[in-house]
Amino acid sequence: MVMFDLPTLTKKDRKRYRWLARHLDAESYVRIQYSVYAKVFNSFESANHGKKRLKDFLKTNVKKGNVRIVMFTDAQFGKMEIVVGEVSTQEEITQPNLFDF
């Protein structure tokens, strides 16, 4: 799971925000909420490889703000509870089994 808070005060800041969001989309991350994206990996090794790719992208493209990466097992992620609202249409279409809880 990737969570980020980037500045959006200037035109350049907003461009970098959109650039990161588009990069995550291109890497098959699913937007859970604004600035919160998740991706399912087949193994711990592929998750680490994906994390390295994202870190490399961030080092060269994001200079300000806050970006956090958290890794969960399927079981841990499955215990997530939606307290208010519901699973988004994008989540249902792109990852139909992601929220089977």
Image (cartoon, rainbow, N blue to C red):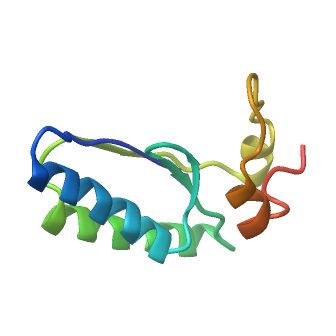
Residue located 9% across and 44% down the image: 10
Provide residue 54's location: percent of width, then percent of height.
Answer: 35, 67
Residue located 80% across and 44% down the image: 78
Provide residue 44's location: percent of width, then percent of height.
Answer: 60, 67
Query: In this rendering, is residue 82 above or below 90?
Result: above
Question: Residue 8: which quarter of the image?
Answer: top left
Query: In this rendering, is residue 81 above or below 49?
Result: above
Q: Which of the pair 78/91 is nearer the observer?
A: 91
Q: Which of the pair 72/93 is nearer the observer?
A: 93
Provide residue 11's location: percent of width, then percent of height.
Answer: 12, 52
Query: In this rendering, is residue 26 above or below 36?
Result: below
Residue located 66% across and 64% down the image: 40
Farthest residue in the top direction?
A: 83
User: With 41 as the anchor, is 66 left or right in this view?
Assistant: left
Quarter of the image where the C terminus is located: top right
Question: Residue 35: which quarter of the image?
Answer: top left
User: With 18 as the anchor, is 65 left or right in this view?
Assistant: left
User: With 43 as the anchor, is 101 left or right in this view?
Assistant: right
Q: Which of the pair 54/5 is nearer the observer?
A: 5
Q: Which of the pair 5/13 is nearer the observer?
A: 13
User: With 12 as the anchor, is 18 left or right in this view?
Assistant: right
